[in-house]
């Protein structure tokens, strides 16, 4: 007997679930939010089967049906966002409108979609306050004083959020196009908190890594007299080689024009010290800039015991960490 009760109890549960699903899916009348949602789905399917202007027109209608149906459903039983007078439905509808307005063929959701979403949602929340009545019997009205204050605070807060989102996306784009900006850090700055640096950019290091073999090719095993002459014109020669390296290895970055390469030459007792500098000339948070340095030792050596001619030998060290401030002046 208990088994039969359990079985009938399960049937009752399934019937209850079926009744709830039917209430949601089956429109109670032709003019309902379910009808609009079904029309949007139908329009989406038809747009896939169409081409050209017809496809765009059907897709446009589908978006309108989806937005209207979602707005209708979410306003039947409004649920407010905690701490605000904005319904959750306004956020959902605002996201759909923002997506529809700023979509592209390549990307449905763009940065503008996210930026304008809070402001559009706030406007959707505020518009009903300027009308009274329901259905077709609607008349314009001026909101009450306390309602005006809520509307102004809500819209102003949403505008601030949109501005912060836009600022974040702009800074992210800067860091993608000019990754070397992330090396010049100042603690507790608003910019660094919004877009943390998780990867140290290597553009300045890459320049010196690629420049070293080119310098060695022009100096190593060359007659000492030619090397000394080369060092006299080192500023122009190194600058030209550096520009070639930058154009070849940094061509994908917008910041390539903000890097420059300079040498610093120092006389030693038995040779020369050549410092290769990759200098960041772009904007920096501190205003002082920075540079990387690679030091090379150039010494004369005898070619062989029988041959008294002297050739050059070059030995380069490691690349330094970023050095804040302007580079040392050329001697």
Image: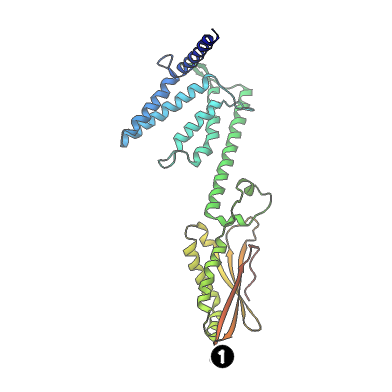
Q: Residue furthest top?
A: 1
Q: Crowding near pointer 1: few (<14 within 10 Å), some, many (20+)?
A: few
Quadrant for residue 312, please give it.
bottom right
Can you give x and y, in whole percent of width and height, for residue 191 in the image?
Answer: 62, 48
47 vs 6: above or below: below
Q: Residue furthest right?
A: 188
Can you give x and y, in whole percent of width and height, for residue 262 in the image?
Answer: 57, 70
Which residue is located at x 44 percent, y 41 percent?
A: 107
**Number of numbered discs present?**
1
Q: Which residue is mark 1?
A: 305
In this orientation, does residue 70 appear? Answer: yes
Can you give x and y, in whole percent of width and height, for residue 157 in the image?
Answer: 61, 34
56 vs 28: above or below: below
301 and 115: which one is in front?
A: 301
Which residue is located at x 32 percent, y 35 percent?
A: 53
Dividing the image into 4 quarters, which one contains the C terminus? bottom right
188 vs 61: above or below: below
Drawn side of residue 299 relative to residue 251, left or right: right
Which residue is located at x 56 percent, y 55 percent?
A: 179
Which residue is located at x 44 percent, y 34 percent?
A: 100
């Amino acid at each position: 007997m208990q088994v039969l009760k359990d079985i009938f109890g399960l049937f009752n549960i399934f019937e209850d679930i079926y009744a709830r699903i039917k209430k949601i899916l089956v429109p109670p009348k032709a003019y309902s939010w379910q009808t609009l949602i079904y029309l949007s789905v139908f329009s989406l399917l038809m747009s896939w089967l169409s081409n050209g202007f017809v496809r765009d027109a059907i897709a446009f209608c589908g978006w309108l049906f989806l937005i209207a149906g979602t707005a209708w459903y979410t306003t039947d039983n409004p649920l407010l966002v905690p701490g605000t007078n904005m319904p959750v439905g306004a956020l959902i509808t605002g996201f759909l409108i923002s997506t529809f307005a700023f979509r592209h063929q390549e990307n449905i959701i763009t940065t503008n979609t996210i930026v304008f979403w809070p402001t559009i949602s706030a406007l959707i929340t505020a518009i009903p306050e300027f009308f009274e009545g329901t259905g077709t019997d609607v008349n314009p009205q001026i909101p009450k004083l306390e309602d005006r204050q809520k509307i102004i605070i809500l819209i102003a807060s949403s505008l601030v959020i949109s501005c912060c989102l836009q600022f974040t996306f702009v800074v992210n784009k800067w860091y993608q196009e000019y990754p070397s900006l992330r090396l010049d850090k100042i603690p507790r700055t608003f910019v660094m908190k919004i877009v943390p640096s998780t990867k140290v950019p290597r553009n300045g290091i890459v320049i010196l890594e690629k420049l070293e073999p080119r310098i060695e090719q022009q100096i190593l095993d060359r007659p000492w007299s030619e090397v000394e002459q080369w060092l006299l014109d080192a500023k122009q020669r190194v600058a030209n080689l550096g520009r070639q390296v930058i154009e070849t290895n940094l061509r994908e970055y917008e910041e390539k024009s903000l890097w420059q390469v300079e040498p610093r030459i120092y006389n030693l007792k038995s040779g020369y010290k050549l410092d290769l500098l990759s200098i960041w000339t772009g904007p920096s948070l501190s205003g002082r800039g920075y540079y990387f340095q690679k030091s090379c030792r150039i010494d004369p050596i005898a070619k062989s015991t029988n041959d008294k001619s002297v050739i050059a030998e070059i030995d380069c060290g490691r690349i330094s960490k970023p050095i804040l401030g302007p580079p040392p002046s050329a001697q």
